[in-house]
């Protein structure tokens, strides 16, 4: 176990119907709020009207920024920063999934910064302050509701970059699983793959002596796996939706499940390059990249992959070598992603090999990526080719 | 899963040697500090000198309150409150195990309260404010380093009571596993049983649909079980000490592993009555009470106990009924407590049946205890008799 510091100040308000507290909770923080949301789904479901009416009743002045894209864009972030400044707002309420919340975080960090907010995503500056934000989560996926990370795309330049800071942890996040009842099947699948992928990035680690952390990781993986199909069969399956939502938050809440472990994050880096160019769903990109990354790197520590096969997938170790077990676990992962309905090859998105070089180059622009196995450009290219 | 709120603002600083940061970290909070500690062990190990010198170098004015007892006493708490007020201090640094930290929390809550601090422990008042505190943990056991709970004894009246508040979460806790290298074998054993017992209170629950929470609980139990004996064999076993320390914190950090689950806490209530009268180690009391509580209540939900037997103890379910499995898990628990060197009967402490009635009566003074099975006076008495 490595030394670590941990501090996660986000207040979680979890439960069926808790979205009805959004207005009153927000009002305890501010009366001048930027309301950030995405497409039409929250209008269709009535959530938008409910939140607006709650804020109104709580005496909160609201300025709106709707239309945040999946893979949220820098242009939206800049628009939000301008709104906050122009209207002298001092709090952001993000209502939506990971994209909306990430955009809200970037706005929060951009407001007190005099330079270009994109500096935070190109290592030109680090976040020194942010205005506070709260969230109402509508999709179980990224974990952004309880961490200090965000990913933004500069669409004009086909760049997708992450940043983070303790300053952008949400002050509160309302987790109401009933809000995910209307999430379409494919988004449920992609979100769940995102959750699992966050755990993979932490679990496949070379750090020794982390038995509790490994078990926490396995706990989330097992719980996601057993809840996705019930949620697909019955989108209003209260138990499955609640479990997936809590898994999403615990999988990436400031790295709590893997404190003291070196994380990898190469697969996310590779996926970001794919979706920066092709705008495919993040979860689908991860379903494509991860099993191939696993095959490429597992021999660095086959025992961890064998443990994964046994503990997460219940594969019997009897009569199998460590390598066979490891590979069986990887196959089970890919087969599961297929079974729940995800794409697992680039070809399914009609993506050919024409941009692979560029992606590989961009992925390692700041040097090799990953820690389980350090990946250079050639390694990334090899993995991308396996994804075709 | 039940609705829940969660907010844990304690900053954790974990790692070998991190105790050397106590002075500088404390100085970022205050320059006028009450230093609270226990017996002579921190003087013997050099930790006391190190902390004093660090605080001195960081320009912190220190007033001391040493000699906090195991099962910390109200008299010490009142002495601490007086010191803080007399010397106009505004921060408490607790260096020690659960007793020291609990005493520090009670002092922190007592300082701004005009009435008797004991009111917080008798439901006469609730904590509305507290001065801030930080901790340097020297024993893996109670979890108090990352929660808002405390237990204090009124020794004159043979009363042991708990209280809690969001106001007494430590601002920071330094978790340096090397500080536990000198913990004697029996304290290592009792502390580990305390950790396991905290998990039991949360895990044996009637709440449905909590698969992630159950697995988190099982993760801690398994990790404690596999690390106690290595730490006993080699007290400076870095990995085992680190794992036990992190388990202790995660087992009871505001209930995070069991959010949305109804907790029980009857066994702790029963144990408190035993140690209030006989001053036996809390962990030993739990080792005595818990297996008997389990036997008394398991039939309320034998499936949970069967799951415990299989997942935590690796007992094969083949050819066993649910009840047989449940009982096998309970037997394994008691046998384990014996094997690692704990007492498992009251007789081993020369405690006879003369005070059982009084204990049972005190345990239910505010009404029946427990939620897995509601225990009335006769139930508590029956369990206590099983403990003889």
Image (cartoon, coloured by chain):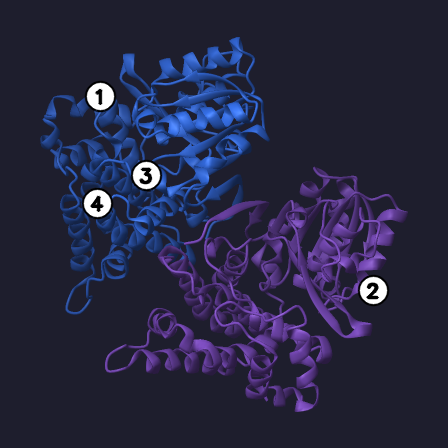
Chain colours: A blue, B purple
- The answer to whether residue A180 is seen in the rendering is yes
Q: Residues within 10 Å of mark 4 (few under 14, many from 20)?
A: many
Quick check: B184 left or right of B312?
A: right
Looking at the image, tell me whether mark 4 or mark 1 is earlier in sequence order: 4
Distance Cα–Cα, label 4 vs label 1: 29 Å
Please, which chain is the residue tagged with disc 1 on?
A: A
For label 1, the SS is: helix
Please, which chain is the residue tagged with disc 2 on?
A: B
Looking at the image, tell me whether mark 3 or mark 4 is earlier in sequence order: 3
Looking at the image, tell me whether mark 3 or mark 1 is earlier in sequence order: 3
Vertically, is A266 above or below B136? above
> Marks 2 and 3: in contact by CB < 8 Å?
no
Q: In the current view of this chain or complex, which residue is farthest to the right?
A: B86
For label 2, the SS is: helix
Distance Cα–Cα, label 4 vs label 2: 59 Å
Q: Viewer-proximal residue, B367 or B380?
A: B367
Vertically, is A138 above or below B43? above
Distance Cα–Cα, label 1 vs label 2: 68 Å
Residue at the disc numbered 4: A232
Q: Viewer-proximal residue, A36 or B374?
A: B374
Vertically, is A169 above or below A238? above
For the residues beneath circles 4 and 1, the answer to whether they share a chain is yes
Q: Residues within 10 Å of mark 1 (few under 14, many from 20)?
A: some
Residue at the disc numbered 3: A180
Residue at the spot x=22%, y=21% of the render?
A277
Indicate the position of residue B349 as horizontal and vertical percent values: 65, 86
Quadrant of residue A15 in the image?
top left
> Marks 2 and 1: in contact by CB < 8 Å?
no
User: In which quadrant of the rendered image does the N terminus of chain B lie?
Assistant: bottom left
Q: Which mark is residue B75?
A: 2
Residue at the disc numbered 1: A277
């Amino acid at each position: 176990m490595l030394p670590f510091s941990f501090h996660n100040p986000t207040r979680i308000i979890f439960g069926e119907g808790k979205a009805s507290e959004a207005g009153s909770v927000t009002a305890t923080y501010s009366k001048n709020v930027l309301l950030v949301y995405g497409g039409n789904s929250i209008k269709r479901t009535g959530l938008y009207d409910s939140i607006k009416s709650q804020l109104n009743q709580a005496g909160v002045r609201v300025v709106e920024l709707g239309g945040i894209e999946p893979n949220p864009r820098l242009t939206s972030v800049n628009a939000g920063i301008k709104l906050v400044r122009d209207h002298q707002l001092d709090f952001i309420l993000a209502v939506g999934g990971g994209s909306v919340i990430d955009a809200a975080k970037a706005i929060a960090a951009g407001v007190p910064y005099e330079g270009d907010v994109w500096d935070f995503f190109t290592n030109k500056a680090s976040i020194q302050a942010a205005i506070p934000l709260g969230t109402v989560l509508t999709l179980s996926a990224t974990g952004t509701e309880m961490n200090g990370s965000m990913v933004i795309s500069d669409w004009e330049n086909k760049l997708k970059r992450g940043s983070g800071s303790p300053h952008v942890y949400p002050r509160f996040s309302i987790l109401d699983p009933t809000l995910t009842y209307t999430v379409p099947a494919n988004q449920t699948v992609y979100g769940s793959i995102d959750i699992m992928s966050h755990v993979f990035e932490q679990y496949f680690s070379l750090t020794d002596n982390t038995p509790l952390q490994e078990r926490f990781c396995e706990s989330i993986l097992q719980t996601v796996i057993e809840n996705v199909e019930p949620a697909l069969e019955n989108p209003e399956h209260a138990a499955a939706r609640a479990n997936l939502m809590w898994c999403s938050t615990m999988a990436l809440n400031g790295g709590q499940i893997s404190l003291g472990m070196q994380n990898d994050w190469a697969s996310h880096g590779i996926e970001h390059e794919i979706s920066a160019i092709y705008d495919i769903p993040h979860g689908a990109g991860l379903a494509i990249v991860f099993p191939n990354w696993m095959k490429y790197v597992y021999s660095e520590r086959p025992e961890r992959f064998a443990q994964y096969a046994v503990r997460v997938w219940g594969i019997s170790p009897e009569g199998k070598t460590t390598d066979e077990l490891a590979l069986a676990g990887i196959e089970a992962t890919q087969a599961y992603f297929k079974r729940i309905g995800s794409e697992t090859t680039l070809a399914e998105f009609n993506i050919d090999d024409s941009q692979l070089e560029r992606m590989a180059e961009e992925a390692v622009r700041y040097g090799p990526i990953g820690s389980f196995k350090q990946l250079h450009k050639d390694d990334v290219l090899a993995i991308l080719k396996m994804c075709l």
